[in-house]
Image (spheres, coloured by chain):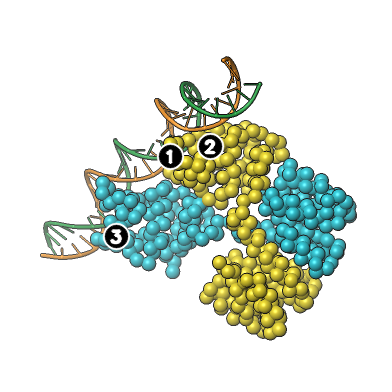
Chain colours: A yellow, B cyan, C orange, D green
Amino acid sequence: MRKLIYLADDDENIRGLINMFLSNEGFEVRSFANGDDLLAAFLQKPADLVILDIMMPGTDGLSVCTQIRNCSNTLIIIVSARDNEIDRITGITLGSDDYMTKPFSPMELMARVKALFRRLELDTGGTSKHILTAGNLNINAATREAKVDGSQFDLTPTELALMVYLMQNSTRAVSRDELLKNVWKFDFEVDSRATDDVVKRLRKKLAAVRCSAKIESVWGFGFKLSEGGE
Amino acid sequence: MRKLIYLADDDENIRGLINMFLSNEGFEVRSFANGDDLLAAFLQKPADLVILDIMMPGTDGLSVCTQIRNCSNTLIIIVSARDNEIDRITGITLGSDDYMTKPFSPMELMARVKALFRRLELDTGGTSKHILTAGNLNINAATREAKVDGSQFDLTPTELALMVYLMQNSTRAVSRDELLKNVWKFDFEVDSRATDDVVKRLRKKLAAVRCSAKIESVWGFGFKLSEGGE
DNA sequence: AAGAATTGCCACAGCTTTGCCACAGTTTAA
DNA sequence: TTAAACTGTGGCAAAGCTGTGGCAATTCTT
């Protein structure tokens, strides 16, 4: 689905320019002459990314930024004519994801917008890379190497596959059936207790090498990975 | 757990400076004089964030960036003495999450490092769309976690399913038969008083964690959720 | 072909869940 | 006011779930 971007800047020329570039990249853009209008629209319908000028009539960009961050984790870029260290640092610290100073290159803004969306994509697991980490455990799914604190240890094929699946879905609890379907590739012909067996052996091996990541069982459902050690 | 940061720069002074700042912020830092060493170390043990200079002896920072991004979605910041639009754009486009030009303020680097970790947290922290809210109670149907004021407590499978159903239909009262049909999946073979039992236990657990949401009984009909505390 | 590793299954023990019951308290309706 | 219907509570036992060690069939190595 097309990404929705809100843009607030009191300079109409800049609005038009950015709007044009973003639209050309295939984004859906709505621009506002001040922060209050943008905030109102955002509360009505949240955008995927927000670009805020700092100096605007009405509420300034930084305040809008904190207000949005308070109720949403949408992506935020701050742009400002004020270029000094303090401004940049407070801008970023206040909750924005990036800070650019005017005059800026529209192309660079495009690149940074796309970088933020890419990061979101990476984090929310659209793509699965083959180097995985959980606590002091890391697994290279390509070379099939598993290491704790850098020292390698052995996992059998099913153990590895199960572990990789859990790590790729470490934010959720995973049901036994889901594991059978995605790790065993067939949910028939295999007792769902088979998952327990592999987990049993995995737990033993992980404990033996003092791995901080643990496989927790979710009663009546399945398992969930915990990185351990906060 | 402490975040691990790898840093590659051929200038020893800069390495020392950044290292000091990052360490002061509580990060665990390892610095390398060139990109090849960093890459080797990364493959051995991945870091949570990587800071790369572009111009270094051996493989340049941009190549290291693409190689890392190829197999991992770790955070990457590129720093460079070359300050022109093309460099910045290609740097970001190649897969890094941020690009800073030398000389840069160490404080700003710190702010940007923390902003990246904050974004990671926002993206991966339970705030997915399967989240249900009622008063100070939060239930994440995906992770099967129930929280009151942020602290987690346990629900059994039926309790969770019943609670989710009530929250999904919080605007109206739900009859016992409807619950049996949609939560138990069979309305035969189970006394309709079974719902009362689960509600009984749910109420006890909710009260124990000072949950503002309450399950009210609708006389002669069923139950209804009230968020409590308006 | 023999041995080793892997892996699914079983049985058992211990724990958790959950439906049901009896009884007391409450609400509704005649 | 009284009887009938309904709900809250504590306890209980059956059913269900998980962890464990052992075992046997299959696959992989040598």
Q: Please state which of residues B38 and C17 is positioned toward the viewer in this rendering.
A: B38
Chain letter for the residue marked with disc 3 in the picture: B
Residue drawn at 73 percent across, 51 percent down: B68
Instruction: Specify the amino acid type for callout 3.
Output: Ser
Image-quadrant location for residue A74: bottom right
Q: Report which quarter residue D6 is drawn in.
A: bottom left
Quick check: B32 left or right of A71? right
Q: Residue at x 61, y 34 (%)?
A: A155
In 3D space, how far apart are the residues under numbered discs 1 and 2 (Cα atoms)? 19 Å
Q: Is residue A113 above or below residue A133?
A: below
Mark sitting on residue A188: 1
Q: CA distance from mark 3 to mark 2?
A: 40 Å
In this orientation, does residue B60 appear? yes
Q: Are marks 1 and 2 in contact (CB under 8 Å)?
A: no
Q: Secondary structure at mark 3?
A: strand
Q: Chain of mark 1?
A: A
Q: Secondary structure at mark 1?
A: loop
> Can you identify the residue that label 3 sits on?
B175
Residue B218 horizontal/vertical position (percent): 29, 62
Are discs 3 and 2 less than 8 Å apart at CB? Answer: no
Residue B224 rendering spot, x and y as whole percentages: 34, 62
Which of discs 3 and 2 lies nearer the camera? The answer is: 2
